[in-house]
Image: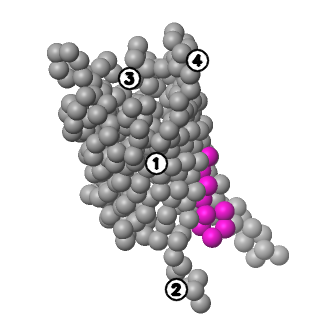
Amino acid sequence: MKLKIHSLIFCVIAWPVAMCMGATPRPVEGIMDNSFLVEEAYNQETGVVQHISTAQYSKNRSSGDSAWNFSFTQEWPAPNQTHQLSYTIPYSSRRSTGETQSGFGDILINYRYQAYFNEDSLTAFAPRLSAVLPTGNSDRGFGDDTVGAQINLPFSTTVGDHWFVHTNIGTTYLPQSKAADKTDLQHYSAGVSVIFAASPTTHFMLECVANWNEERSPSGRVTRPPVTVISPGVRHAFNLPRNLQIVAGLAAPIGLSSAADDYGVFLYLSIEHPFSRTPSEKR
């Protein structure tokens, strides 16, 4: 009887100690590569593929214009976490002055290099180089009708067990853009996000992004006023058998600058799963 009591006391004491010593994942480890507007710096693990679908609605109260912007991204290790290949397909539906136009935009083919990754602090740096393909209709405002290049420099780290910080800066070069009467254009972007991991499966997010786009004017190339948006949001992970993880997210982008739309809704869905089996699974 004394042995049973001693065993029970040991279990009561040892369980919370094991929890504190890492028997369960830290909250920041539950969801890592599922940012919305600010790109994180964690490449896909070996043998794991990710499918990301997003939908964003935006509304401008002064003009009455609105838009739905959709995208689908698929990310693959090539062949491991050091190198990642992906593509992004955008589609938009815009309503302006009572008329609606819809179409595909310019597709991105992406290569990302995991230049640095610290597993303990989850600090990472992964520069990305993308080819911009002229798949959109420039006459309808859905593309630039030129092959361009994009560079982005995402950096990610954690602060303790409950906080993420992500930053990135980037630029897009579009030579001889048909949307600007065959003028070379250069666009710039910057973003920062802070994420609180309330638990391994539920994270609260605050993202802020700004874009500076060039356009043609009678005097030459000019940079338009920045489009600056702040976006509070939340994401939740559903961890299913066979290492299948589904992450659903919701955010509410709010325009901070005069060039930005006033408000909107952002929807996020990620499906991540292994595409190859381990030796133990094959037996």
Q: Quadrant of residue 113?
A: bottom left
How many numbered callouts?
4
Q: Secondary structure at mark 1?
A: strand
Disc 4 residue type (three-letter): Gly
Q: Is residue 65 above or below residue 43?
A: above
- Is residue 23 something one can see in this rendering? no
Q: Secondary structure at mark 4?
A: loop
| Residue at image mark 4 | 98
Q: Position of residue 36 (x, y in %)?
A: 49, 40
In the picture, the disc for residue 89 is 1
In the picture, the disc for residue 279 is 2
Disc 3 residue type (three-letter): Val
Disc 1 residue type (three-letter): Ile
| Residue at image mark 3 | 227
Q: Residue furthest left?
A: 219
**Residue interval drawn in magenta:** 240-248
- Marks 4, 2: nearer the viewer: 4
Q: Nearer the viewer, residue 168 or 13?
A: 168
Q: Rate crowding at label 3 as few (under 14), some (14 to 19) or many (20 or more) other CA atoms within 10 Å.
A: some
Q: Residue furthest top?
A: 62
Q: Rate crowding at label 2 as few (under 14), some (14 to 19) or many (20 or more) other CA atoms within 10 Å.
A: few
Give the position of the N terminus as an image quadrant.
bottom right
Q: Residue at x 48, y 20 (%)?
A: 261
Q: Position of residue 139 (x, y in %)?
A: 39, 32
Disc 2 residue type (three-letter): Pro
Q: Position of residue 105 (x, y in %)?
A: 43, 41
Q: Is residue 31 above or below residue 105?
A: below
Contact between marks 4 and 2 (CB within 8 A): the answer is no
| Magenta stretch, overall SS | strand
Mark toward the start of the polypeptide (3 vs 2): 3
> Could you tell me how far apart the alpha carbons at marks 3 and 2 are, in whole angstroms?
50 Å
Q: Quadrant of residue 37?
A: top left
